[in-house]
């Protein structure tokens, strides 16, 4: 069977959240009304909810050990934490497309990470050793401790790391698909861009170690891009690229198409730029938490029309 699409997985996660909430004894009438509105808002929502209603049938289709482990997670969560029950329910809801590859797609996706930010969200996290993380939109990380080593795995997206004042011998690392970033104490950002990872050092320094290449020190105020084999480029830090950590999106004479591609990362839906206006130049500082205001600013400052068929389908075209 075909693997689930990102949109399907997102609706499955939402259905899992609603399933957990509606089966809570403390559920309110207002929450039930909100669930009804969600259910009828999109066909994929109804599709995901139908899977929730078939929950018990679905888990019987799983291999025995997989089913028992998942149900154990859900049972444990009734008396412990909400994150666990969402993991258990989400896995069960995703089981309908279950080949081994489909199962791995769900388990290894962002919903099963230790920390996961939603699209448009910037999620602050304080770790047990005092390290502070800030997850950018649609990002996911795992965290584990090995003695004095704090090991962070970036599953997807972008994070800022502010490591605590280290104890003697303590160190921290961030693993991406392309290699390892390590430090004793630093403040830096890491972004998984697909074909490569980007590191920006905001304070002190880090060591960048490509998976199959030579490691390199990256000092304060520098940025680099690296893949599995090498560090491809080291340049002066572009502070506009780290503006998201302050809740901002900065454009400096940027092509509109590029700007909208960046903005689209913070929007749950389709933000399309007509090629006829993609080359227009834009400059300004925009607040990421005010998406509608950004769209109004585009329409008032450039010869473009912003057409919203729904909140999830937006097109910027010639005025």
Image: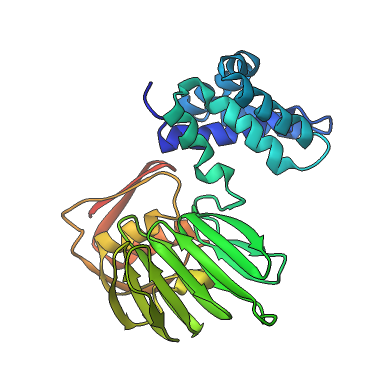
Residue found 63% across the figure and 24% down from its top: 65
As rendered, which of 234 and 65 lies closer to the eye? 65
Residue 193 position by quadrant: bottom left
As rendered, which of 29 and 148 lies closer to the eye? 148
Residue 189, x across and y down, in percent: 47, 71
Residue 28 position by quadrant: top right
Placement of the N terminus among the 4 image quadrants: top left
Residue 24 position by quadrant: top right
Residue 299 visible = no
In this rendering, position of residue 299 left or right of residue 73: left
As rendered, which of 57 and 314 lies closer to the eye? 57
Q: Is residue 162 above or below residue 222?
A: above
Residue found 44% across the figure and 59% down from its top: 176
In this rendering, position of residue 24 left or right of residue 131: right
Residue 94, x across and y down, in percent: 53, 27
In this rendering, position of residue 7 left or right of residue 66: left
Residue 249, x across and y down, in percent: 42, 69
Q: Is residue 60 above or below residue 202?
A: above
Residue found 20% across the figure and 65% down from its top: 280
């Amino acid at each position: 069977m075909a693997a689930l699409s990102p949109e399907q997985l997102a609706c499955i996660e939402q259905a899992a959240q609603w399933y957990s909430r509606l089966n809570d004894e403390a559920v309110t009438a207002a929450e039930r009304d909100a669930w009804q509105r969600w259910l009828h808002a999109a066909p994929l929502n109804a599709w995901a909810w139908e899977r929730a209603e078939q929950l018990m049938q679905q888990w019987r289709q799983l291999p025995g050990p997989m089913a028992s482990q998942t149900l154990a997670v859900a049972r444990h969560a009734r008396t412990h934490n909400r994150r666990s029950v969402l993991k258990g329910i989400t896995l069960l809801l995703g089981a309908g497309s279950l080949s081994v590859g489909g199962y791995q797609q769900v388990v290894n996706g962002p919903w099963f990470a230790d920390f996961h930010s939603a699209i448009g969200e910037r999620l602050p996290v304080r770790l047990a050793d005092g390290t502070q993380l800030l997850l950018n939109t649609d990002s996911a990380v795992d965290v584990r401790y090995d003695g004095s080593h704090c090991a962070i795995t970036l599953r997807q997206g972008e994070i800022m790391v502010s490591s605590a004042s280290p104890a003697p011998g303590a160190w921290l690392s961030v693993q991406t698909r392309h290699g390892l970033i390590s430090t004793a104490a630093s403040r830096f950002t890491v972004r998984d861009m697909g074909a490569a990872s980007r590191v920006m050092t905001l304070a002190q320094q880090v060591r960048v170690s490509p998976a199959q290449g030579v490691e390199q020190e990256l000092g304060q105020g520098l940025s680099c891009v690296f893949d599995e084999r090498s560090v491809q480029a080291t340049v002066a830090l572009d502070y506009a690229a780290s503006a998201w950590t302050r809740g901002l999106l900065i454009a400096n004479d940027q092509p509109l198409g590029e700007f909208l591609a960046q903005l689209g990362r913070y929007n749950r839906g389709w933000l399309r730029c007509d090629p006829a206006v993609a080359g227009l130049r834009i400059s300004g500082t925009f607040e990421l938490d005010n998406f509608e205001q950004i769209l109004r600013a585009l329409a008032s400052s450039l010869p473009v029309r912003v057409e919203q068929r729904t909140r999830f389908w937006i097109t910027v075209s010639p005025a």
